[in-house]
């Protein structure tokens, strides 16, 4: 380990964490931002505080998964960790340039999988039995739960007018609950996504989990401030404008599912949980056909599909280029 290598790895970690913050701020505060409930400076401050809290309190399990359960202990060293994080950061940066919120967990798992394939030590059971099924089940659950719950209040009809009367009578409380639910999402991000940078570093023996989570989490707020504006617009306004009730529901459903994944130690995509929930709202308001035929919807799914593959391929190629087995 030499000084230039340490500087390069530090730069990549900072770049990766900032891009994760840029991608994560959209699912955290798209509801509040789309509903014009909060100013951007306040939004960024709350995002940073609750990401740090989530990382410190619940970030350990996913860090352990990414640091040693996908590839055996000893496979990841300094150089391999550098390539894994660079590959994941590159894929995530591409998604941010396209203004599509993307899963930090999936690009990280893709990069680690590329390393596992290169060294022929990929733990297939952990990947295909534990992780990938959750990537399918939880977004479907997010879509289904949102659709089921939101149907009770939308569209307005004779059977649910009493609900609207209560909502209008408690407008201030609904506004507060929307902001609280956004902070809840930021907490969930800290519990799961900060581990994407910490896990490979821990697996290489470069940092302990507690210190890594505390050091890297603040970089999420910085990235959200510098790179997250486009993602906020995409998630909060372009797909469907979110009101107080729908925004709160989206935040609550997605954050709860992500914290569930964090407790299981599964690196999970909050971005995909959130967008799936927003799609459910759009389908009820605008119809299924209109929602799925829109270019933003098709572009979102395209980017989701290719970026983990790019991350995996980039890691494998760079290892072939620079690492001797």
Image (spheres, helix red, strand yellow):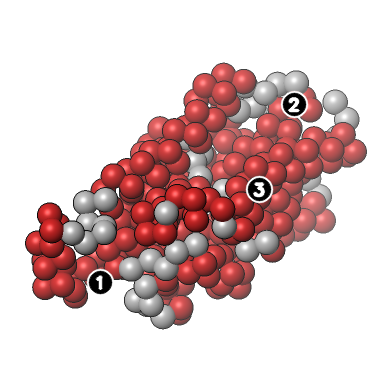
Asked if marks 1 and 3 touch (Cβ < 8 Å), the reply is: no
- The answer to whether residue 297 of the structure is visible from this angle is yes
Q: Tell me, for residue 117, which label it has, or none.
A: 2
In x, y percent, where is residue 175?
25, 71
Residue 43 versus residue 266 in the image, above or below: below
Determine the secondary structure under disc 1: helix
Residue plotted at (36% across, 54% down): 284
Which quadrant holds residue 83?
Answer: top right
Give the residue pinned by disc 3.
Answer: 302
Q: Quadrant of the N terminus?
A: top right
Q: Nearer the viewer, mark 3 or mark 2?
A: 3
Determine the secondary structure under disc 2: helix
Q: Residues within 10 Å of mark 1 (few under 14, many from 20)?
A: some
Asked if marks 3 and 2 touch (Cβ < 8 Å), the reply is: no
Residue plotted at (37% across, 59% down): 285
Mark 2 / mark 1, whichever is N-terminal: 2
Give the residue pinned by disc 1.
Answer: 175
* Label 3 to label 2: alpha-carbon separation: 24 Å
In x, y percent, where is residue 92?
66, 53
Q: Tell me, for residue 225, which label it has, or none.
A: none
Q: Nearer the viewer, mark 1 or mark 3?
A: 3
- Left or right, 144 with respect to 319, comes to left
């Amino acid at each position: 380990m030499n000084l230039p290598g340490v500087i390069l790895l530090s730069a990549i970690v900072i770049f990766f964490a900032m891009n994760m913050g840029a991608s994560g701020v959209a699912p955290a505060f798209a509801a509040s931002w789309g509903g014009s409930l909060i100013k951007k400076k306040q939004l960024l401050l709350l995002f940073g505080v609750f990401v740090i809290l989530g990382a410190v309190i619940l970030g350990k399990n996913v860090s352990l998964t990414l640091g040693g359960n996908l590839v055996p202990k000893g496979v990841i060293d300094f150089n391999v960790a550098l390539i894994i994080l660079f590959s994941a950061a590159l894929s995530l940066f591409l998604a941010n340039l396209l203004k599509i919120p993307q899963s930090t967990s999936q690009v990280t798992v893709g990069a680690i999988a590329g390393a596992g394939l290169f060294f022929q030590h990929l733990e297939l059971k952990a990947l295909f039995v534990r992780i990938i099924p959750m990537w399918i089940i939880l977004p479907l659950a997010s879509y289904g739960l949102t659709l089921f719950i939101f149907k009770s209040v939308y569209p307005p009809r004779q059977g649910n007018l009493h609900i609207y009367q209560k909502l209008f009578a408690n407008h201030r409380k609904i506004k507060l609950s929307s902001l609280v639910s956004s902070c809840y999402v930021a907490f969930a991000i800290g519990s799961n996504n900060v581990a994407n940078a910490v896990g490979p570093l821990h697996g290489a023996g470069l940092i302990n989990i507690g210190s890594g989570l505390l050091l890297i989490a603040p970089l999420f707020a910085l990235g959200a401030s510098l790179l997250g504006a486009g993602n906020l617009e995409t998630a909060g306004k372009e797909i469907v404008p979110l009101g107080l009730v729908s925004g709160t529901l989206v935040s609550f459903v997605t954050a709860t599912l992500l914290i569930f994944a964090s407790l299981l130690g599964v690196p999970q995509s909050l971005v995909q949980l959130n967008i799936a929930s927003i799609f459910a709202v759009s389908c009820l308001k605008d119809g299924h056909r209109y929602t799925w035929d829109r270019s933003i919807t098709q572009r979102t799914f395209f980017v989701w599909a290719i970026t983990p593959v790019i991350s995996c391929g980039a890691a494998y190629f760079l290892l072939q280029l620079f690492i001797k087995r």
